[in-house]
Image: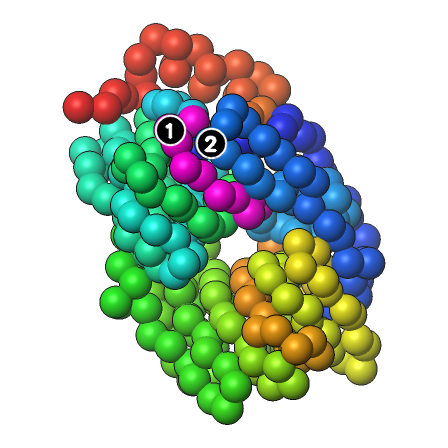
């Protein structure tokens, strides 16, 4: 699935910021056809602090929208929220052909290139995040691979007034699965009114935090940032560990997503579903796709 815009960004030239964050950023409305609605976030909106994330779309999808499409030089990650209804049919040129269910994760590390297709089964309503994760330059031509984590396999951290799924990585002493690419923590959590949850952000990790629904007050390093539904913030890395707190100041339950990983800090060029080191590399992979070298769906 892809609903991305083209982008060129030299993240290696972004200023070093000690766990500083810009203002809360609202997603931009994105509609494709009559079956796909999203709030879109792009790395250029965060001045490099979103690295290694390239884009995130918070979407609802009710009909097939994109058809079979290529990916190369990145990981395409689908996180389905638990309130999704029905099945999300996933196919790719690695030979995978199965349905994603509510709460599932699918990580497709495209590397040198794959063909991918995701579409709701008839009557389904899919709610989740589509995420493009950058790859280091040295991994752009690697063999494609994938990881499917079913909802039942995802461990949960539960405390008074909070429930957090540790989709990947580790939080509060609970370890989930490891990504097939660079190490990353992904949390999908709910916080009741006036409750608080914490996460240890490790040294040199950046983080992207999103208020899926409700309100959040994020506290880190003595600074507070308020997020309303549909807003996100990116935190640049620091040289020490830091405890991040999320509190729900509202009356309704809050839903959040958190992504944390070490930034790659390399320049890249994005064009649609491709992320490469240069425009020449983009042209090469487009030619490979046109000639059928990225594989096909069986």
Residue at horizontal 59 percent and vertical 31 percent from the top = 31
| Residue 44 falls inside the magenta stretch | no
State if disc 2 and disc 1 touch (CB < 8 Å).
yes
Q: Secondary structure at mark 2?
A: loop
What residue would you read off at disc 2?
35
| Residue 64 falls inside the magenta stretch | yes
Q: Earlier in the sequence, mark 1 or mark 2?
A: 2
Residue 197 falls left or right of residue 151: right
What residue would you read off at disc 1?
64
Percent x, y for residue 207? 62, 62
Q: What's the magenta region?
A: 54-65
Percent x, y for residue 269? 62, 29
Please, is residue 276 above or below residue 18 in the view?
A: above
Point out the residue furthest to the bottom here.
160
Percent x, y for residue 171? 47, 77
Residue 98 falls left or right of residue 213: left
Judge whether residue 113 can be spotted in this image: no
Please, is residue 232 above or below residue 297 in the view?
A: below
């Amino acid at each position: 699935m892809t609903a991305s815009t083209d982008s060129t960004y030299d993240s290696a030239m972004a200023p070093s910021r000690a766990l500083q964050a810009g203002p809360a950023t609202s997603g931009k409305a994105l509609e494709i056809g009559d079956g796909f609605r999203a709030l879109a976030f792009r790395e250029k909106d965060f001045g490099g602090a979103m690295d290694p994330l390239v884009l995130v779309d918070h979407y609802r999808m009710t009909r097939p929208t994109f058809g079979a499409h290529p990916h190369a030089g990145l990981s395409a990650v689908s996180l389905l929220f638990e309130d999704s209804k029905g099945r999300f049919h996933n196919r790719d040129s690695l030979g995978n052909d199965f349905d994603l269910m509510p709460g599932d994760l699918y990580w497709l590390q495209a590397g040198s290139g794959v063909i991918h297709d995701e579409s709701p089964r008839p009557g389904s309503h899919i709610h989740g995040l589509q995420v493009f994760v950058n790859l280091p330059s040295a991994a752009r031509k690697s063999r494609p691979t994938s990881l499917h984590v079913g909802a039942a396999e995802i461990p949960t951290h539960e405390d008074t007034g909070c429930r957090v799924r540790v989709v990947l990585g580790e939080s509060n002493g609970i370890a989930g699965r490891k990504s097939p690419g660079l190490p990353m923590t992904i949390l999908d959590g709910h916080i009741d009114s006036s409750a608080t949850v914490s996460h240890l952000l490790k040294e040199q990790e950046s983080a992207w935090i999103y208020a899926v629904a409700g309100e959040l007050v994020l506290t880190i390093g003595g600074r507070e940032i308020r997020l309303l539904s549909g807003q996100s913030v990116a935190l640049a890395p620091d040289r020490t560990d830091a405890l991040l707190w999320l509190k729900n100041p509202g009356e309704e339950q809050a839903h959040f997503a958190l992504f944390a990983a070490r930034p790659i800090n390399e320049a890249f060029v994005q064009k649609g579903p491709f992320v490469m080191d240069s425009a020449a590399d983009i042209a090469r992979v487009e030619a490979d796709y046109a000639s059928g070298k990225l594989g096909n769906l069986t």
